Image (cartoon, helix red, strand yellow):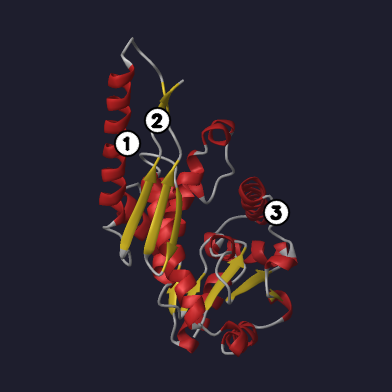
Amino acid sequence: MAIITISRGCFSHGQEIAEKVARRLEYECLSREVLVDAAQLFDVSERKLIKSIHDAPNILERITNGRKRYLAYIKAALLERVKKDNVVYHGHAGHLLLAEIPNVLKIRIMAEIEARAAMMQQQQNMSRGQALKFIESEDKHRADWTRYLYKIDLSDPRLYHIVIHIDQLNIQDACTIICTAAQSNTYEMTAETRKSINDLAIVSHLKAALLEICEAEVSSNDGHVHVKVAAQKLRKTGQSSPALQKQIFSTIQKGLTRQILDIAYKIQGVVDVECDVELPYYS
């Protein structure tokens, strides 16, 4: 019983291997399903989510951090899916989105670019030059995306437990290697790991849901949630007495607390919530 992430470039047989491993182990195989979940959970278009995990951030996105919001949605949806373990995930950046979870088996599938181009030519009916150009562009997008968001090199073998060069193996052999590793005690789901995933799922879901209203520090211990919101800076628009200011600040504090509690108690697994919202202040 394990969680497996399979990282791969396009046309590297990664999807085929993921599906075969899932069938052999009788696990759930996930990719686009997580995007559908995220779109439904957070009422955002699937197209925007796909863009957030495909294109390298432009200058505006680097300033506003807009893309990180969508990644928070995807991470929250993925964690909801892996809580029950027995999952093979071959969507983009699974090994990074689940980096905080112990015992996740992280696989990287490698293939030579010529073999990938030949596969793309066959499937997409295009020239060798077109295929090579597409793959090189796609690889650059993913490398830039990972470098910007995580400050790491996607090709670094230290990010993975097993790196498989598929040009030197057949598909069945690759699947056997992955299945053998997944069935070892190293990647077995323990009670401690399950607790860690459940709490992380709650934290990720709540933090993502709160992005629309505030930035918050969130922690969870067996569903007992603590939310801390630092004092918000307000722009003063007129004169008011200290007593009226205090009343305004208190009203804002109570309103934000109610919003947070309403959101938190809708999340599966939440037992109770301690909410610590600091009073706002005028800049």
Q: CA distance from mark 2 to mark 3?
A: 37 Å
> Would you say the residues marked 1 and 2 are in contact, meaning their CB atoms lie under 8 Å apart?
yes
Q: Residue furthest top?
A: 239
User: SS class of the residue under badge 2?
Assistant: loop
Q: Earlier in the sequence, mark 2 or mark 3?
A: 3
Q: Earlier in the sequence, mark 1 or mark 3?
A: 3
Q: Which mark is residue 253?
A: 1
Answer above or below: position of 47 versus 37: above
User: Where residue 36 sits in the image (x, y, percent)?
Assistant: 35, 59
**What kind of residue is marked 2?**
Pro
**What kind of residue is marked 1?**
Gln
Q: Which mark is residue 280?
A: 2
Answer above or below: position of 214 versus 219: above
Q: On the rendered structure, is 64 left or right of 159?
A: left
What residue would you read off at disc 3?
A: 152
Answer above or below: position of 147 versus 187: above
User: SS class of the residue under badge 1?
Assistant: helix
Q: On the rendered structure, is 241 left or right of 26?
A: left
User: Where residue 10 sits in the image (x, y, percent)?
Assistant: 59, 61
Q: Residue at x 61, y 65 (%)?
A: 8
Q: Residue at x 48, y 51 (%)?
A: 71
Would residue 80 be seen by someone viewing this image from the given angle?
yes
In which quadrant of the rendered view does residue 105 lie?
bottom right
Q: CA distance from mark 1 to mark 3?
A: 39 Å
User: Where residue 236 sits in the image (x, y, percent)?
Assistant: 38, 16
Residue 176 or residue 84, whichever sits in front: 84
Q: Residue at x 51, y 33 (%)?
A: 64
